[in-house]
Amino acid sequence: MKTVLYAAILSLLPLTASAQVALNTQGQEPQYVETIKGRAQKIVDGLQLNDAQKAENVRNIIANRYFLLNDIHAKYGKDQQDALYAELYKHHFELASALSLYLTAEQVDAVKDGMTYGRLRRDYQAQLDMIPSLKEEEKAQILIWLKEAREYAMDAADSKGKHFWFDKYRGRTNNWLSARGYDLKKEREAWMKRTSGQKP
């Protein structure tokens, strides 16, 4: 397992932007490899890169990240949470560092969104739509928490785990807004009426 993890880590970190990033499939089931390649390719397609080698390198970096996460979660399981989170944190920043050789900061964010089902943008827009009276500093704080949720969600083992982090931070945001005097029940009811074409 250590050999597999080490190989996966190395494949995330090309030495130069012109180096070819190898797809590390060691220890992975063939069907899983194809699934992950397809998932990573879908994210890359959204970036609309016009350099074929760059696109392939980015695809492989993303796929290798999924392989690494799969190995880490398989290694520790649910009974070793402290060790699991320590290992995830140790490797957390490698993805953005590797991608930054090929992508702009905005494109790296797009990859993060692709790996987390676009929850950040959807949840942020929903919050703005539900409470149009939000102050600028409140919008900024909500976005900060959503970005934090996205960082945790990126390391989750599956879709359920990814959604968990956004739901957790949504609860934190709602509690914070309630403490600031917002009646979320009334805001939500008014929002539903607006979206259904009725007058609030």
Image (tube, rainbow, N blue to C red):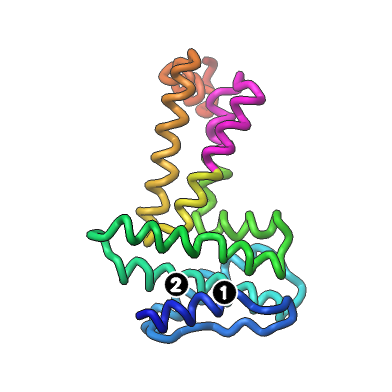
Q: Amino acid at mark 1?
A: Leu
Q: Earlier in the sequence, mark 2 or mark 1?
A: 1
Dominant SS of magenta comes to helix
Q: Residues within 10 Å of mark 2 (few under 14, many from 20)?
A: many
Q: Position of residue 52 (x, y in %)?
A: 72, 79
Find out whether residue 53 is within the magenta segment: no
**Residue farthest to the right?**
50
User: According to the image, label 1 marks what residue?
Assistant: 12
Whether pointer 2 and pointer 1 mark residues with C-beta atoms closer than 8 Å, the reply is yes
Identify which residue is drawn at 45% across, 15% down: 183
Identify which residue is drawn at 44% across, 74% down: 67
User: According to the image, label 2 marks what residue?
Assistant: 68
Q: Amino acid at mark 2?
A: Leu
Q: Secondary structure at mark 1?
A: helix
Identify which residue is drawn at 47% across, 74% down: 36
Q: Is residue 119 above or below residue 181?
A: below
In this rendering, position of residue 54 left or right of residue 73: right
Q: For the magenta stretch, what is the residue range?
A: 124-146
Q: Is residue 74 above or below residue 113?
A: below
Numbered marks: total? 2
Q: Position of residue 198 (x, y in %)?
A: 52, 20
Residue 86 is marked as none
Distance (Cα) linking label 2 and label 1? 9 Å
